Amino acid sequence: VKPVRGRIALDGILRALGARGIHHLLVEGGAALLGGFFDAGLVDRVVVFVAPKIAGGAAAPAPVGGAGVKNMDDARPLRVRRTLRAGPDIVWWADVVR
């Protein structure tokens, strides 16, 4: 898969992996990579770790970059399948609702 404008075509990578029999992929990247997958509509399941901390402010780091949404009504809902405590953190296993 060749880069386009310095970026890898994520759907092309997934097709290449699928051709090799790989049908599940764990993406543990930074906000830009995760945002790219979300922007391309390539996420169907997530595992979300929520720490009991607040990092507010306009320049606060976000776990998912990309285009994002303008309004909360446009946010992608999750269907939480399982919730677990991991020390002080909460972990959700969830499907992205289309």
Image (cartoon, helix red, strand yellow):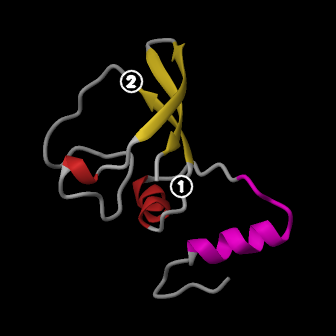
Report the front residue among 71 and 91: 71
Q: Which mark is residue 70?
A: none
Q: Whole-Å distance between the Cαs marked 2 and 1? A: 22 Å
Residue at image x 21%, y 47%? 72
Residue at image x 63%, y 86%? 2
Mark 2: few/some/many CA within 10 Å (<14, 14-19, 20+): few
| The quarter of the displayed image where residue 67 is located | bottom left
Q: Is residue 16 magenta?
A: yes
Q: Position of residue 45 (x, y in %)?
A: 57, 45
Above or below: residue 44 compared with residue 80 = below
Name which of mark 2 and mark 1 comes first in the sequence: 1
Q: Is residue 17 magenta?
A: yes
Magenta stretch bounds = 10-24
| The quarter of the displayed image where residue 78 is located | top left
Q: Position of residue 1 (x, y in %)?
A: 68, 82
Which residue is situated farthest in the left direction here? 57
From the viewer's perspective, is the residue at label 2 or at label 1 nearer? 1
- SS at badge 1: loop
- SS at badge 2: loop
Horizontal relation, residue 96 to residue 63: left or right? right
Q: Which mark is residue 43?
A: 1
Residue at image x 30%, y 49%? 75
Q: Which mark is residue 51?
A: 2
**What residue type is disc 2 on?**
Ala
- Give the main secondary structure, helix, strand or loop, of the magenta stretch: helix
Which residue is situated farthest in the right direction here? 21
Report the front residue among 51 and 72: 72
